Image (cartoon, rainbow, N blue to C red):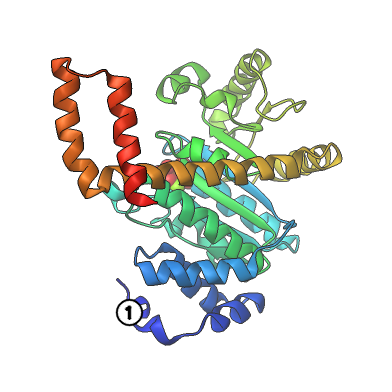
Amino acid sequence: MSKFVKKNRDIPVEHYINGIKKADRVVLAQAITLVESNAKHHFEKAQQIIEALLQKKSKSIRIGITGVPGAGKSTFIDSFGTFLCEQGNRVAVLAVDPSSQVSKGSIMGDKTRMERLSRHPNAYIRPSPSGGNLGGVNRKTRETMILCEAAGYNIILVETMGVGQGEFVVRDMVDFFLLLVLTGAGDELQTMKKGIMELPDLVVVNKADGDNKEKATHAKREYNTILHYLKSYTEGWITKAVTASAKEEEGISEVWDIIHSFQEYTKKNHLFYEKRAEQQRNWLHDLLKQELYRYFYNHAEIKEQLIKTERTVISGEKSVASSALDLLNLFMEKKI
Ligand SMILES: Nc1nc2c(ncn2[C@@H]2O[C@H](COP(=O)(O)OP(=O)(O)OP(=O)(O)O)[C@@H](O)[C@H]2O)c(=O)[nH]1
Ligand SMILES: [Mg+2]
């Protein structure tokens, strides 16, 4: 626990709310620390701050960036983010790293990969919250996003590694999802999780520079062929593959043009806010399921009864369905 978290009991919520409204980066960072804390009283304070800062229709765009390790996500965010900042945008970079428990936050531990962006006054970079399960990381990232938007960041970039469940979680919290790939579609697809090709709104073949340029162009064609046969994630939007070089800063403005037309298209047919509404609903239900599960399995009497019930269903004394119902009834009697 950081020194700040230990000391912060006396800081009133107004301090955070006003500071964030004034785009004070130090206060924003302090509020995010509260959101990331697992202590109960921090949770309550964080919720008060968030509720005061909720926006009905935030004008931001949330962009998820995924890809296998080494695809160039951080380098791409550095170039892309700097490009966006130079156009007058305010860019916040967050990360979802389900592996951080093991690797202690490998993702974006390398702020050096975002050296230029981290120095830009319009950018705010927050490394991934460490510890906790994917559900916890999910909530923390979503709430951090709300705080950043309230502080005036109009573009939110979320980096996640395309290896675990992270990309599915991030897909459901962003408006636009970008998959960064390398050359050789065949090989790479094998290391990527099944179904991932159905998630992106854009595929960017990175490292299209030097000797690699030709191979990247070839891979782009291969990806376009694959994408042609897949259903798009966003109705009516055709997911394409393009080439770029994060290092040489080529194809960066083209990526932004595509995101811009995506925004225009989805706002015109109301999909943009419909998707956000759906994401809010999903989040609520995910959270409810998670909490119900936790309450149920942590309930002392349920735990005890569950062992007995297991025995009776294994021995065939009682049917599984009626045993489950009995347990649920017991749980409800105890809770309500
Ligand atoms: N030639 C070339 N190299 C690149 C490009 N983009 C990234 N790289 C290099 O590829 C390596 C990995 O880049 P990162 O940006 O760290 O990749 P990442 O996807 O963020 O990696 P993880 O965070 O470990 O998942 C680094 O050595 C980069 O310098 C590019 O456009 N061209
Ligand atoms: Mg990275």
Question: Looking at the image, is 328 positioned above or below residue 115?
Answer: above
Q: Which residue extends farthest bottom?
A: 10
Q: Amino acid at mark 1?
A: Lys
Say which of 136 and 249 sits in front.
Answer: 136
Residue 25 visible somewhere in the drawing? yes
Q: Residue at x 51, y 22 (%)?
A: 195
- Where is residue 47 drawn, in percent x and y? 51, 66
Whether residue 294 is visible to the viewer of this picture, yes or no, is: no
Badge 1 marks a residue whose secondary structure is: helix
Position of residue 270 in the picture relative to residue 210 (left or right): right
Position of 311 compared to 219: left or right? Answer: left
Residue under the point 49% across and 42% down: 286
Front residue (pair 238, 142): 142
Task: Name above or below for residue 34 compared with residue 212.
Answer: below
Q: Position of residue 185 (x, y in %)?
A: 52, 20
Residue 312: x, y in percent?
16, 23
- Quadrant (top left/top right/bottom left/bottom right) for the N terminus: bottom left
Residue at the (71%, 56%) spot, across then down? 60
Q: 205 or 290, which is in the foreground?
A: 290
Q: Find the residue positioned furthest to the front.
A: 333
How many marks are shown on the rendered structure?
1
Q: Is mark 1 within 8 Å of ligand 2?
A: no
Provide residue 308's location: percent of width, then percent of height: 14, 32
Q: Nearer the viewer, residue 200 or 290?
A: 290
Q: Where is mark 1, residue-wise? A: 6
| Circle 1 Cα neighbour tier, 10 Å, few/some/many (<14 / 14–19 / ≥20) | few
Say if 229 sits above or below 179 in the image. Answer: above
Q: Is residue 66 above or below residue 183?
A: below
